[in-house]
Image (cartoon, rainbow, N blue to C red):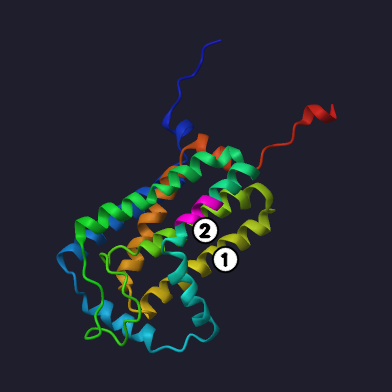
Amino acid sequence: MVQRKATARDVVIRPLLAVAVLTALIATALSFYVAGHPFIPQDADVERDVQSTNWGPLALTFPFFSWIGDAKGFVFEVILFALILVFNRRAWMFAAGAVLSGGWYVLVSHLINRPRPTTSQVLRVTEHPGASSYPSGHTIFIVTVTVVLLLCLGYRFLPRWGRVAGWALVAVLVFANGVARMYTGAHWPTDVLGGILIAVAWLSFLASFRWVWGRLQRPAPDRRRFA
């Protein structure tokens, strides 16, 4: 029997790779723009609108997003990785690769070194992280952790409707985190957008490999047991 040579279609999932390439290109363009324009007037306009809005019960979550993105986030990542090893060891490679998204944050933030919002530019600054503003490390963390949790554990145990609900919850958490970072004056809107784009680009790239994506899915039942 003649073995067929592996093609690109056999190695990668094209839609996911397309998402990775598109978001990476947009993130690159945004990063270059921010590097050349540290202060963007439209950023300040949006941030003042966010800070002047009454967010109601959503505002109760803002301290959580400030807390989870600091050093405690590393502890949370360790716990999450341990849970993946226990409940879906097949997915450990995707989870390990996802952690490297933090490396992109370190690289980009050092290259751009954007100043954070000041009280003369926005309505309030109640959080002073002290590092480069772009991209938002909290946002990269939230996107990475929630997506890893859903793909590595949710896709292993949840039914289809549960996965859809899971993606909706991911979107809500990412939105709430973005609002929180702007409401406290810790980040500009483009910092948050950059964080989302970088995280989505990297996670989509990792998941686009078929041998990685296959390990995230629920294993097919062994039909030989019922033969």
Q: Which residues are magenta?
A: 74-79
Along the viewing direction, whichever of 109 and 191 lies nearer the viewer: 109
In the image: residue 1, left or right of residue 116: right
Residue marked by disc 2: 146
Q: Decide: few, some or many residues near mark 1? Use Cα within 10 Å; few <14, some 14-19, many ≥20.
A: some
Mark found first going from the N terminus, 1 or 2: 2
Residue 151: x and y in percent read 56, 50
> Where residue 135 sits in the image (x, y, percent)?
30, 62
Asked if residue 200 lies in the magenta stretch, the reply is no
Could you say whether the residue bearing mark 1 is in a helix, strand or loop? helix
Q: CA distance from mark 1 to mark 2?
A: 9 Å
Task: Tell me what residue is drawn at x 52 percent, y 87 percent.
Answer: 56
Residue beneath the point at 35% across and 48% down: 21
Of 15 and 102, nearer the camera is: 102
- Name the amino acid, label 2: Thr
Say which residue label 1 marks.
Answer: 169
The one nearer the camera, 210 or 215, is 215
Q: What residue sits 31% from the left and 82% below the top?
A: 125
In the image, residue 27 lies at what x, y percent?
Answer: 30, 57
Up the image or down, 40 lies above or below 86; here it is below
Residue sitting farthest toward the left: 36
Q: Is residue 158 above or below residue 49?
A: above
- Specify the farthest residue to the right: 227
Tell me: residue 37, above or below residue 93.
below
Q: Which quarter of the figure is the N terminus placed in?
A: top right
Mark 1 touches mark 2? (CB < 8 Å): yes
Q: Is residue 78 magenta?
A: yes
Q: On the picture, is 55 further left or further right than 125?
A: right
User: Magenta stretch: dominant SS?
Assistant: helix
Q: Amino acid at mark 1?
A: Leu
